[in-house]
Image (cartoon, grey):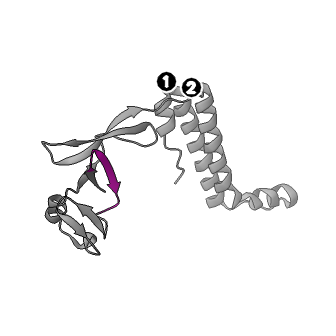
Amino acid sequence: MKAINKNGTIEVHQGIPNSFSSSLGTVLGGGSSMSDEEGKAHGFFDVVLPSGYDDRIHNLSDIFFVSKDQHYTYTKSNKTWSETLAQLKANKIDNLKSLANNKLKSTDWYVIRKAELGTDIPSDVVTARAAIKTTVDTKENEINAISKKSDVVIYDINLD
C-alpha cells in the first residue's frame, strides 16, 4: 500500500494510482509503472502496519508519517469485546465442534451402517475419527484454560 499527504489529508491507495495530481504535476496513465523513487518524488510512500498488528485483536487509527523511516503507519490499539470471556470461549468451542462435525460427516455413514447392519467400520476410519475427537477435546481444554479475551479470539481451531 502507498499513501500520500494531500493538503493535510492522508490518502491511502493499494499502489500508486495510474492517474493522480501531486506537487510535481498531474500524472495520467503511468503511476502503476513508476519506481518507488519516482513515487516518493510525487509524495507516495509505503504504508507499514505497526509491529505485532493482528486485525483480529487490534484496531488501526490515526495514520501518520514517520520521517525517520520515510513511511506511513498507523496507531494500533487493542479491540474490546462486548462478550464476556466465558461467552467468547463458548462461541470458540461451538465453532470448533462445528468444524469437527463437518470433518466427521464424510465418515458418518460408516457409523450408521454399523448401527443399522452391524457392518464393521474400517480401522483407518475409526483411527481418523478418534484423532479428530481427541484433537477437539485437547483444543476445548486449551480454550477453557485461556484467561484473556484476545487470546481466545486468536486461538487457532483449525483441525487440519
Decide: few, some or many residues near mark 2? Use Cα within 10 Å; few <14, some 14-19, many ≥20: some
Locate residue 47 relative to residue 54 in the image: left or right. Answer: left
Element assignment for label 1: loop
Q: Which residue is mark 2?
A: 85
Is residue 47 rendered to the left or right of residue 56? left
Q: Which quarter of the figure has residue 93?
A: top right
Q: Are marks 1 and 2 in contact (CB under 8 Å)?
A: yes
In the image, residue 64 above or below residue 85:
below
- At x 62%, y 29%, the residue is 87
Query: Which mark sits nearer the N-terminus, 1 or 2?
Result: 2
Q: Assess disc 1: are there few (<14), some (14-19) or many (≥20) residues with their C-alpha within 10 Å of its C-alpha.
A: few
Does the segment drawn in magenta span residue 14? Answer: yes
The residue closer to the viewer here, 22 or 69, is 22
What segment carries the magenta color?
6-15
Q: For mark 2, give the secondary structure.
A: helix
- Position of 84 with respect to 115 (left or right) is left
Amino acid under disc 2: Leu
Q: Which quarter of the figure is the N terminus placed in?
A: bottom left
Tell us which disc is closer to us: 1 or 2.
Answer: 2
Q: Measured from the top left, where is residue 37 in percent x and y? A: 13, 62
